Image (spheres, helix red, strand yellow):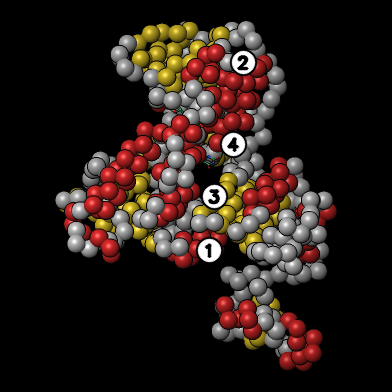
Amino acid sequence: MKVIIVGGVAGGASCAARLRRLDEHADILMVERGPYVSFANCGLPYHIGDVIEHESDLLVANEQVFREQFAVDCRTGCEAVAISSGDKTVQLRDVASGEVATEAYDKLVLSPGAASIRPPLPGINLPGIFEVRTVPDARETRQWLERGTSFLAGMGKYSGFQTVRPPLRAVVVGAGFIGLETAENLAHRGFDVTVVDMADQVLAPLDREYGRIVEKFLERHGVRVALDDGVAGFEQSEDTLTVATQSGQRYSADVVILALGVRPDTTLARMAGIEVGELGGIRVDEHMRTSDPDIFAVGDAVEVRDFVTGEWSLIALAGPANRQARIAADVIVGRDSRFRGTQGTAVVELFGSTIAWTGANEKTLRRLGVDDFEKGYLYPNAHAGYYPGAKPIAMKVLFRKSDGRVLGAQAVGEDGVDKRISELALAIQMGATVYDLEESELCYAPPFGSAKDPVNFAGMVGAAVLRGDLPVSHWESVEDGFLLDVREQVELAVECLPEAVNIPLGQLRARLGELPRDREIHVVCR
Ligand code: FAD
């Protein structure tokens, strides 16, 4: 059996390795048009920030490993330029020489990834404007940053003021996770960073109130966030770039990073007449088979079902790409493996804090007209409060009102966020309810958690709401009634609701007489 795999990074390389493990005799050809296979694109922002110092650390495996260890005919600088599904052949072009050769396949796997969104804005090709997609992108960005740093450090426009030299300025266009990770890394390198996005929040998979937490947090760390304002174009004068926005703002920059998101690369699939979905990704079934039964597709290029909502979705994440690749390999050798759908589980680290999410968010549920859901907000400590360094986690959990099934979760905090969201991600995939979360037995010792872990807590809050033990009202729907703030003075010093009446929790039982009996009382705590 001859299998050709197009794309040699996350999905392609995983598929090739799995296929070899399952079938020692398969003839496997993996082609990659870029210079590297199996590189860690997830590490690129950290290489730009010099956290990952050496480029070689990003290269997880190379052509030689695939050839010698996996007996895979692995070719870099080799682009698949056409598919003829009728006679089951692929045309391969050698990038260096331009020569085209035809190779036959029994099964074809497409893992071409996604292309960066790059609108035709004036000046978008000016020097000093970079993307964060490939190893060469990161290399060029680093060279530019190093040149700029040494230029200003040595002489130039600020000579004579070297001791008070202003920092170099970076503008990052796009407030998704790649944009924010790169912004953080540039800030670490001493850049004065502004993030611009046309959306009204950062990190679109979060609900707006969680986006706000992240925005405030970025601002506290010196990163300016300019939202609701699309970029109109780029200009250059002498050695300074200017990013002009639709609202008329102008941001000066020494470097610009474009992180506007990605679009599935469906060029080959369209050429081959394979079905492409409404969202623009290659349509696949649960076996990762395209509309052509001998062609499989995986990774950023495909459209798959959302595990929670059942809707088609595009999720550009490494985890799904790797799992889908294994499934495609399994199915090619005759196993009945199935992709369960994606939950979009993701995590980002910014300035020592972690932001993570899984499953459906509230805005998606509302957009889809789902009203059978409730939400709970909680702020448990990441580990026992009496053990040093306990920090709260801000958690939002969404669950079905009718049966308590967990639908999604978001969390922000300095410690223990990733494990809680990972636990909740697994719970969602297993169809767990808030009642199951209440009963989950999770590991505990004071440095790691609490006897009632935040995930147990999330279940207890959700179950208390559903059992009617804790009727809940939400800030956006409270119109009248009596607002009672039960926070202590020290908490009110941090933030308060001016229109609320404060009776600290410790005094509440003694002061119940002060509460009105003719109005609904909405209680606010931390
Ligand atoms: P890719 O890994 O992009 O591989 C596709 C390859 O196919 C490319 O190398 C391309 O050159 C090649 N190709 C395309 N067309 C052809 C052709 N016609 N012929 C030959 N070769 C072709 N995900 C996470 O889950 N967590 C993270 O923290 C994270 N961080 C990221 C940070 C950055 C900067 C980037 C860019 C991505 C990040 N991702 C992260 C996303 C993750 O890397 C992708 O979801 C994953 O790599 C997708 O795998 P893929 O195989 O579909 O595509």
Q: Relative to residue 466, is residue 473 depicted above or below? A: below
Q: Earlier in the sequence, mark 4 or mark 3?
A: 4
Is residue 66 at all visible to an observer of this figure? yes
Q: Which residue is drawn at 75% across and 70% down?
A: 471
Q: Relative to residue 442, is residue 67 depicted above or below? A: above
Q: Name the residue under label 1.
A: 213
Under circle 2, the secondary element is: helix
Q: Which residue is drawn at 64% across and 69% down?
A: 474
Mark 2 Cβ and ligand 1 under 8 Å apart: no
Callout 4 touching callout 1 (CB < 8 Å): no
Is residue 458 at all visible to an observer of this figure? no
Q: Mark 4 points at which residue?
A: 319
Q: Which of marks 2 and 4 is nearer the N terminus?
A: 2
Mark 3 Cβ and ligand 1 under 8 Å apart: yes
Q: Mark 2 points at which residue?
A: 20
Mark 3 vs mark 1, foreground winner is 3
Badge 3: few (under 14), some or many (20 or more) residues near its Cα, within 10 Å?
A: some
Q: What is the quadrant of residue 284 in the picture? A: top right
Q: What is the quadrant of residue 169 in the picture? A: bottom left
